[in-house]
Image: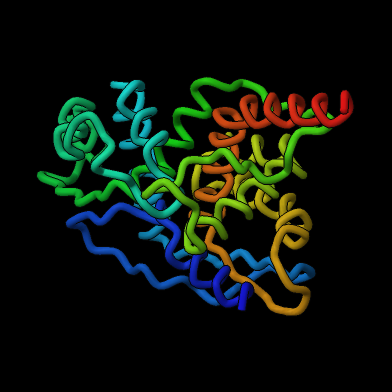
Amino acid sequence: MMRLTLVIAALALPATSLSAQRTFDPERLDRTETGTRFKIAEEAVDSGKMRVMQKRIARCAALNDRELAQELLEKSDPVTVDYGELSVEYGEMLDEMSFSRCIGRAMPRSARMMRVRSDGATMRNLFAEEIYLHENDEPPVIGEGDPELLDNRYYAGGRSYMMAQVPAQLADCIVYRAPAEAHEFLETNPTTSDEREAAEALGSVVDECLPGEDSEVSFSLAQLRGYVADGLWSRSHYGPMASSAAKVDSEGESEE
């Protein structure tokens, strides 16, 4: 049952692509890597171009107003944004970030006009990547006694739920077991050979973090990037607080 939920969560995970008024084929090719239970699905060329563009747009918008980008991250989980908890409406938030101007900067010179439809859930993991990379030059340091799963994450609605909990736990596991490799992967540019090589270096770790032993789960590079971005940002944001709480509990137990 958990295995099926994971596959569904992987397919539903945001940050795969923005929806733009340009023609592209979202179907992935069938070629996959061998030797691991975790498979990397090859992406169609136009989809790859879209990934490059969405990163440029997200970086531009997030760095235009890091406080608003951080707020979106703090009031969301891997699949849902808690819109009611935001200080401004989502559309107004994008306006404050000069989102339209960022689209203009990212679109090809040959294009006369480009319209992008974005939702908060998609932008959330894209912002997680850009804010994390902006604030962290080095991978997170996982200390002895630090928890593998961050139980102090924010979940929309105030409580964890399976659809968000599954990808969150996978993200936490990957970063906990391979922080340096996860950081290196996120530092690569989409669609490059470096990105694929860094993803393959994470293959054995992803295998260990997947529930079950027999099933194969195929992730696109964009989906894997979403997991890693969420895991790294969450570890850098929630990790210190989770570690402190764990140490306090441990000290309290030892004193007793």
Q: How many marks?
A: 0
Q: Residue 2, how many percent across, how many down?
A: 62, 73
Between residue 247 and residue 112, name the one nearer to us: 247
| Pick the front one: 156 or 220 | 156
Q: Which residue does the image show at 63% across and 74% down from the upper left?
A: 3
Give residue 237's quadrant in the image: top right
Q: Where is residue 245? Give x, y as percent.
A: 68, 28
Image colouring = rainbow
Name the quadrant containing residue 108. Answer: top left
Image quadrant for the N terminus? bottom right
Q: Position of residue 81 (x, y in %)?
A: 33, 47
Q: Is residue 63 above or below residue 192?
A: above
In depth, the one of 4 and 189 nearer the eye is 4
Give the farthest residue toward the left: 112
On screen, residue 12 above or below 194:
below
In the rendered image, the quadrant that contains the C terminus is top right
Classify residue 126 as left or right of residue 97: right
Q: Is residue 59 left or right of residue 94?
A: right
Report x, y in % for residue 56. Answer: 36, 36
Q: Is residue 30 shown left or right of residue 83?
A: right
Residue at point 23%, 27% (across, down): 97
Please determine whether, in this image, residue 133 is positioned above or below residue 119: above
Q: Residue drawn 59% across and 28% down?
A: 236
